[in-house]
Image: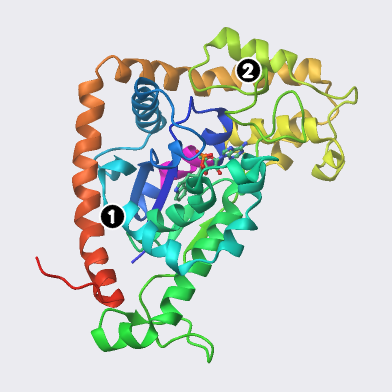
């Protein structure tokens, strides 16, 4: 049975990249599959411990953003990671399945650790192992994310595969596996963990900085002008798009014409994603026009889509008790799925169960 899992870190505010690359794409999945959306607070401490109040505030803000974006707590499980113990427990087991070399190859680790790798937290190195645990504690089959998470999802598949292979005999003997849907001589007949499908598609898998079309839009960029935050009001959105870097040419009429024009491609991609269109459709409409005409249209569209969401977020955040109640119910529902899976994992490993 298909099951979706995805998450966002509560480190500062959500930006347009998080919304278009991930959260907005989760909304329609709620009617097609079982959906679980997590606020990954355990991941949020890997690059340094935020202020206690800040972490709590950001956790509620991300939750409010999920709901304001259209994630419905009646259809989806919404919870924060630290409240479901199974994440940390499975991550530890995966730390013993995964190899240090796998972690050392992660580009996000290299970027985040910077020059002084010896001084990065061990948690930052093991970050992808926790991410694999998030997904596999629910045996999730589909993970909708932005392009920057691709390498982490490949590692999740590698961990699942190694676990399935290394413990193939035990999985079979204990009767805790399911038949391998794609049998081959190299893979076991029965699988414990599914081999997760990344869902990375659409015009907005990678939104770039408004100041530099070669850098991704990110929470950690020191320039606030580089990103549109989901909490920005209409004036801020308008100012940031007006100041966004562009080139002097008119927009091309075909997608090919965006090649080597990263800033133009980025703004067209943002427009397309906000309008629910393809880049080609946007260029049919705006091809031949100057940025002086395209930018006002983009501002209007961005405000039209984002303003109701920002207002709804503000309304939700005025009553933290309501948000906390959603997270509490979500944590209970998530635990109910993860607990029996971890019970089987402990059996496979051979931990003596005396309780
Ligand atoms: P995070 O918190 O950095 O980002 C959350 C989601 O937003 C996407 N995203 C972008 N998409 C397009 N353009 C951008 N500029 C952009 N910036 C961010 C990310 O791809 C992501 O989908 N490790 C994850 C969180 C995580 C997770 C998981 C995700 C933890 N466990 C399990 C899926 C499944 C992260 O740091 O995302």
Give coordinates of residue 117: x percent, y percent. 64, 45
Q: Give the range drawn in magenta.
A: 22-28
Question: Which image quarter holds the N terminus?
Answer: bottom left
Q: Which colour scheme is used?
A: rainbow
Mark with earlier residue (1, 2): 1
**What numbered label is drawn on residue 86?**
1
State whether label 1 is within 8 Å of ligand 1: no
Q: In which quarter of the image is the C terminus?
A: bottom left
Asked if residue 51 lies left or right of residue 254, the reply is left
Q: Residue furthest right?
A: 249
Residue 85 vertical placement versus 93 (above, below): above
Question: Which one is in front, 103 or 338?
Answer: 103
* Residue 67 at x, y percent in the picture: 35, 31
Secondary element under disc 2, as helix, strand or loop, is helix
Residue 299, percent from left and from top: 64, 17
Pointer 2: what residue? 224
Q: Which residue is drawn at 44% across and 27% down?
A: 50
Which mark's residue is nearer the viewer, 1 or 2? Answer: 1
The relative height of residue 121 versus residue 173 in the rendered view (above or below) is above
Is 235 situated left or right of 85 in this image? right
Q: Does the magenta stretch include residue 336?
A: no
Q: How crowded is mark 1: few (under 14 residues within 10 Å), some or many (20 or more)?
A: many
The secondary structure making up most of the magenta span is: helix
Callout 1: helix, strand or loop? helix
Residue closest to the eye, 302 or 285: 302
Please determine whether, in this image, residue 340 is positioned above or below residue 312. Answer: below
Q: Which residue is drawn at 31% across and 57% down?
A: 89
Residue 256 location (% of width, % of height): 84, 45
């Amino acid at each position: 049975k298909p099951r979706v899992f995805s998450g966002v870190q509560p480190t500062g505010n959500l930006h347009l990249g998080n919304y278009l690359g991930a959260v907005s794409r989760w909304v329609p999945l709620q009617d097609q599959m079982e959906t679980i959306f997590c606020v990954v607070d355990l991941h949020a401490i890997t690059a340094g411990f935020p202020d206690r109040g800040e972490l709590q505030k950001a956790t509620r803000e991300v939750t409010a953003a999920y709901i304001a974006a259209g994630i419905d707590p009646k259809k989806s499980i919404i919870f924060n990671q630290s409240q479901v113990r199974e994440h940390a427990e499975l991550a530890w087991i995966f730390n013993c399945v995964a190899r240090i070399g796998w972690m050392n190859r992660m580009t996000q680790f290299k970027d985040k650790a910077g020059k002084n790798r010896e001084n990065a937290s061990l948690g930052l190195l093991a970050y992808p192992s926790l991410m694999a645990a998030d997904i596999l504690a629910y045996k999730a089959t589909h993970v909708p994310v932005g392009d920057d998470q691709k390498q982490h999802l490949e590692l999740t598949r590698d961990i699942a595969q190694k676990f399935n292979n290394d413990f193939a005999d035990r999985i079979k003997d204990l009767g805790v596996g399911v038949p391998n849907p794609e049998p081959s001589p190299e893979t076991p007949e029965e699988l414990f963990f599914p081999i997760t499908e990344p869902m990375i598609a659409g015009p907005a898998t990678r939104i770039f900085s408004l100041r530099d079309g070669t850098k991704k839009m990110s929470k950690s960029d020191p320039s606030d002008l580089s990103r549109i935050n989901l909490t920005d009001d209409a004036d801020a959105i308008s100012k940031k798009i007006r100041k966004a870097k562009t080139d002097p040419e008119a927009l091309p009429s075909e997608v090919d014409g965006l090649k080597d024009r990263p800033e133009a491609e980025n703004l067209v991609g943002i427009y397309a994603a906000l309008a629910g269109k393809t880049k080609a459709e946007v260029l049919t409409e705006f091809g031949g026009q100057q940025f002086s005409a395209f930018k006002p249209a983009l501002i209007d569209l961005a405000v039209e889509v984002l303003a109701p969401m920002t207002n709804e977020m503000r309304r939700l955040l005025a009553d933290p008790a309501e948000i906390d109640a959603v997270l509490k119910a979500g944590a209970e529902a998530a635990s109910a799925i993860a607990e029996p899976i971890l019970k089987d994992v402990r059996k496979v490993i051979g931990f003596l169960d005396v309780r």
